[in-house]
Image: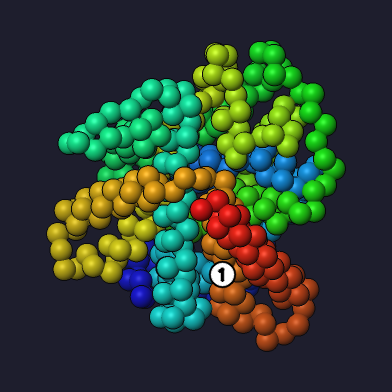
Amino acid sequence: MEGKKHEDYSITLTIPFLHSSEDYVVVNSKEEQYTNESGASFISTCFNGLNALSGVGLLSIPYALAEGGWLSLILLLVIASLTFYTGLLIQRCMDTDPTIRSYPDIGNRAFGKTGEAIVSITMNLELYLVATGFLILEGDNLSKLFPNMDFDVYGYHFGAKSGSIVLVALIILPTIWLHNMNILSYISASGVIASMIILGSVFWDGAVDGVGFQEKGRVVNWSGIPSAISLYLFCYCAHPVFPTLYTSMRNQRQFSKVLFLCFAFSTVTYSLMAVIGYLMYGSNVESQITLNLPTNNISSRVAICTTLITPIAKYALMLTPIVDSIEARFHASYNKRIFSFFIRTILMISTVIVALSLPFFGYLMSLVGALLSATTSIIIPCLCYLKISRIYRRIGVEVVFVGFVLLSGLIVAVVGSYVSLVDIVSQL
């Protein structure tokens, strides 16, 4: 679906790809070309970007390291670098056409209606399952903290885990009705702070409260490498949100700086949590490290309780592109505000139902990372960039590198998905 032309864009651009800003050739240049006075500030966008990149992955990253062994940390750095690069490709795709407002619009610009449909389905499915994973995570952690929290509603019994999922959903519900990205950035800031508290609490549990860092771990576990890669990739699955952040920015020229800061901060945080968690519990670490923590320690309770903030802070940001996609297709036929309220509420209810039906977290996130994150964060940006920029017509360093990144994404998607599906089937 072709987006409408934004009123601030009144000129034509010719932009060489992957060159410095000094090389840009602009016809009838105006600074307003990349300026939206009513948009989100640099700091607000950084918080939203950090919130999209960090969160649930922080809890599963020690398990990913345990699956792959110490040498798999190199793969974490490689994946962080490649996904940062593909984030830049998304920005450059959007720079070529001011009518591009969303991730599906990039697919449309590259491959027409078919490309738009494929991107939209893949993106929305990934974000939907990630949001569902938030609720599963909450059910696991709250039921660990309050094992006797069960109740009955109209004859239906909710156990500790299912009751926790419903309770958290009710708390999250008001946040998904927010439309303003500046307001959402305050919630995102709380999510970033929560991630730091969780990291600090887990470290305190190991250093002060007696758990210790005595585990040696394995140098490498070849059989677990596919799962490790899938989970590492899941940590960087925010690409469908990037166009929303980009279009909401007051000064879009600063978006590459936002990406760099967000990826650098998130990678350092993920690496620290992976090392700390693996040294604490070794190969016995759970798919969520909070499930290993002894609940009699105050630091453990702080970490588990703080985990509750993560889905509250991230859920709305993950669902926003899905809502935007649905509203863009149907808003002309309905009252926009009422329809938006209805869609957001229905999406919330449906994720609760799915979360109540799924008994595992780690395997689901591994599948999301392998199949969907590899597609949306690596494969789609590379394919769309190659098509839009037309650099595939001439062989050079750039096209070879983009091809290498694309091939890597395809291998991860195929191998990782197979391993994850086998693991899920074995648990059913």
**Which residue occupies the foreground of this view, 97 or 378?**
378
Callout 1 crowding tier (Cα within 10 Å): few <14, some 14–19, many ≥20: many
The answer to whether residue 344 of the structure is visible from this angle is no
Amino acid type for the residue under numbered disc 1 = Ile
Identify which residue is drawn at 32% across, 57% down: 323
* SS label for mark 1: helix
Quarter holding the N terminus is bottom left
- Extreme bottom residue here? 393
Above or below, 330 against 58 in this view is below
Using the rendered view, name the quadrant where residue 125 is placed: bottom left
Identify which residue is drawn at 42% across, 68% down: 120
Identify which residue is drawn at 56% across, 74% down: 384
The answer to whether residue 51 of the structure is visible from this angle is yes
Give x and y (percent) for residue 221: 80, 48
Above or below, 32 against 332 in this view is above
Relative horizontal placement of residue 236, taking residue 337 as reference (left or right): right
Give x and y (percent) for residue 183: 35, 39
Identify which residue is drawn at 61% across, 32% down: 289
Give x and y (percent) for residue 195: 55, 32
Which colour style is shown? rainbow
**Which residue occupies the foreground of this view, 340 or 35?**
340
Give x and y (percent) for residue 414: 64, 68
Q: Which residue was labeled with disc 1?
A: 380
Q: How many marks?
A: 1
- Extreme right residue here? 219
Above or below, 266 against 252 in this view is above
Using the rendered view, name the quadrant where residue 78 is placed: bottom right
